Image: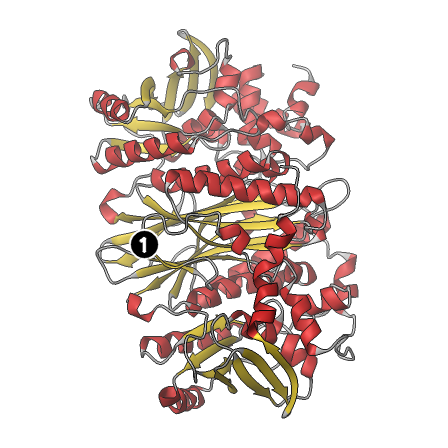
Amino acid sequence: MEPKVWREMGLNDEEYARIEELMGREPNFLEVGIFSVMWSEHCSYKTSKPILKKFPTEGPQVLQGPGENAGIVDIGDNLAVVFKMESHNHPSATEPYQGAATGVGGMLRDVFTMGARPVAVLNALRLGPLEEENNKFLFNGVVSGISGYGNSIGIPTVGGDVYFNSCYNGIPLVNAMAVGLLEHCHIAKGVATGVGNPVMVVGARTGRDGIHGATFASIELSEESEAKRSAVQAGDPFMEKLLMEACLELIHAGAVVGIQDMGAAGLTSSSSEMASRGNSGIEMDLSLVPRRESGMTPYELMLSESQERMLIVPKAGREKEVEEVFARWGLEATVVGKVTDDGILRLLEDGQVVAEIPAKALTDQAPVYHRLSREPGYYQELKNIELNDLELKANVEDVLLGLLANPTIAGKEWIYRQYDHQAGTNTMVVPGGDAGVLRVRGTNKGIAMTTDCNSRYVYLDPYIGGALAVVEAAQNVACVGARPLAVTDCLNFGNPENPEIFWQFEKACAGVAEACRVLETPVIGGNVSLYNETPARTVYPTPLIGMVGLLEDLKHVLSNQFHSEGEQIYLLGESEGELAGSEYLALFENLEAGALPELNLQEIKKRLDFLLELNCAGLLLAAHDVTEGGLAVALAEMTEKYGVTINFDTKNKLKTLFGERLGRIIISTSKDDALRIESQAKTAGISLHRLGESGGDRLRISVNQVMCLDIPLNKYRSVFEQTISKIMETDVGF
């Protein structure tokens, strides 16, 4: 075989030599194609495996950690939450609607493959500035794809987060998270066991769409990748709904030994991974695979990523039952092979063997790379830029309005009004809250969920920034009254073969790991997305964190809005923020620089525990974390119905009003409970500052008893709520 063949498939010469060694012979064209997708970065994690092993993955709440289609955590009463987060970045850069839509569909399949009924979807989006038409086009397409798929299948999109930065120009990050619920007895796994058990392809027919999609996701975006638009799949949410119901019916009937979504690498990954996990082999006759296009070759059948398909291993003798269930839902289910005991993935066409590969050679024996790591030159340079002498560039009102008009901070109603966030009628906190909250029917419990990461922080200090992504997620979950349980992640970085990029990856993951250890939120699954770059730029390191939390009693769910006159307002945590990495610094000084504040994770854990204790005692009325834009922006976000009157005594007005420092939360309580909270904070050694009280229809802030802001609520709320809508009302060429 000519080297050109395997190189075009994404394999290097050393990898091809390793394949020959594992096979004991020269592989044929089909076998090389199978290895190329399974050994792609997207499927094999060949760069990230050594780093991911450092994540904490266990805890008393963990029922299933990494290694399956999705992770599972216990929430008591024989119930569990299943959740997973993944990327669809490269497909969304070339076909934003289908790229985002199929990302949602894939996440939902990962959840119901585990036996859970999906109950929610979240999205985490990163795009370039909306002043550029292409970014508006991508933004419009991605949001339309998410809403089109989620709304059609009837799963509410209840939260997410969106950031805009020039580093994402032409390289959007589109990460989706899905959450489901199940009873412990219905947990299913992606394994092929039981010699002689049938192997069945169910759901949609196989087409030519998505071929080499996993390889496409493992290269940088360029003119070459633009030519690979055929690697982007097309989704059908209505068929997915039927597929979901049929699969759940079979799992709950106890007919299924193993089941797996045909996601990245399609039939190749599902069959080889199921066989590998089950320490077994699989034999399939590809001539039996239902297809929607004529003349498809074994290569195309194995590498297609057509959507809405599953590979199922039912118990022998129950094939007819599987066929009948799928027929009732209007879908096909076809026996294409059987489980064997020889550990080989054996493929036939019309009875003739066309490929024979040890299953573990495709999975466990994939190459693992220990990349070179080097601190980037920018790191110390930006860290040492002195910011302490900066003063406010404008009056406080102009700064506040400027920050609220920044699309990263501005209200995201233009996005979530396109989502049916009340589908299923279980949504207790809708998008716009600190975290989404759903009731668990039949109980008093609720589950909270969020996605978070400030990539600018991670760029300036990958270790601290990675930890802060976990901290922000935990704060958001705690601010709706829930105890953080566990994490799924989507680690978005550039080319790891660049030592400076790999250094970012290594340090950021170390920060994530340490924060998860201290906050007791193990990582139960996730995704790594590398090569997010073009010849012109690389994205900021973006380790997005998806987190789920538990409310034991929904009567304690918290809002992030003041809802009455006279609420007593406090700041939990430091009184001042810092300018390093702040939105103020970027917007008004055109600078992304500075040394991030030192991180005390133990202190933050103590504050979150204190917050949850106050809430369980019924002492809190509202809570909201202080993040982008600082304290003044957080107060403006909380004043949809009632204004506030605030006074600070401070030496630095800029840092107090617009500085940023995670670990700070605004809380409110009644006048009757204020002294009790102050006393408990003093006893617990918690930093607590009284700010003022709610009331009226203005945001009034005094610094050192001197009024510096007095602005009508309707003036700044209109800026906050309408900015993105006004931008997107113009023609985006979609």
All told, the count of numbered labels is: 1
Residue 487: quadrant of the picture:
bottom left
Kindly identify the residue that appears in the image at 59 percent across and 59 percent down.
722
Instruction: Point out residue 356 in the picture as x, y percentages from the top left corner.
Output: 46, 18
| Foreground of the two, 6 or 693 | 693
Indicate whether 315 appears above or below 160.
Answer: above
Indicate whether 5 appears above or below 567.
Answer: above
Kindly identify the residue that appears in the image at 22 percent across and 20 percent down.
320
Q: Which residue matches tag 1?
A: 426
396 vs 107, left or right, is right
Kindly identify the residue that appears in the image at 38 percent across and 32 percent down.
238
725 vs 678, left or right, is right
Secondary element at image label 1: loop
Instruction: Point out residue 680 in the picture as x, y percentages from the top left corner.
Output: 39, 88
Q: How is the image coloured?
A: secondary structure
Instruction: Point out residue 183 in the picture as x, y percentages from the top left corner.
Output: 24, 48
Residue 252: quadrant of the picture:
top left
| Foreground of the two, 671 or 33 | 671
379 vs 523, left or right, is right
Kindly identify the residue that appears in the image at 42 percent across and 68 percent down.
478
Is residue 716 in sight in this rendering? Answer: yes
Quarter in which the N terminus is drawn = top right
| Foreground of the two, 637 or 116 | 637
| Foreground of the two, 711 or 290 | 711
Inspect the image, locate mark 1, and give the three-letter code of the amino acid beneath it: Asn
Is residue 495 in sight in this rendering? Answer: no
Instruction: Point out residue 22 in the picture as x, y percentages from the top left corner.
Output: 53, 25
Quarter in which the C terminus is drawn = top right
608 vs 52, left or right, is left
Indicate whether 222 appears above or below 636.
Answer: above
Residue 378: quadrant of the picture:
bottom right
Q: Local crowd at mark 1 within 10 Å, few (<14), some, or many (≥20)?
A: some
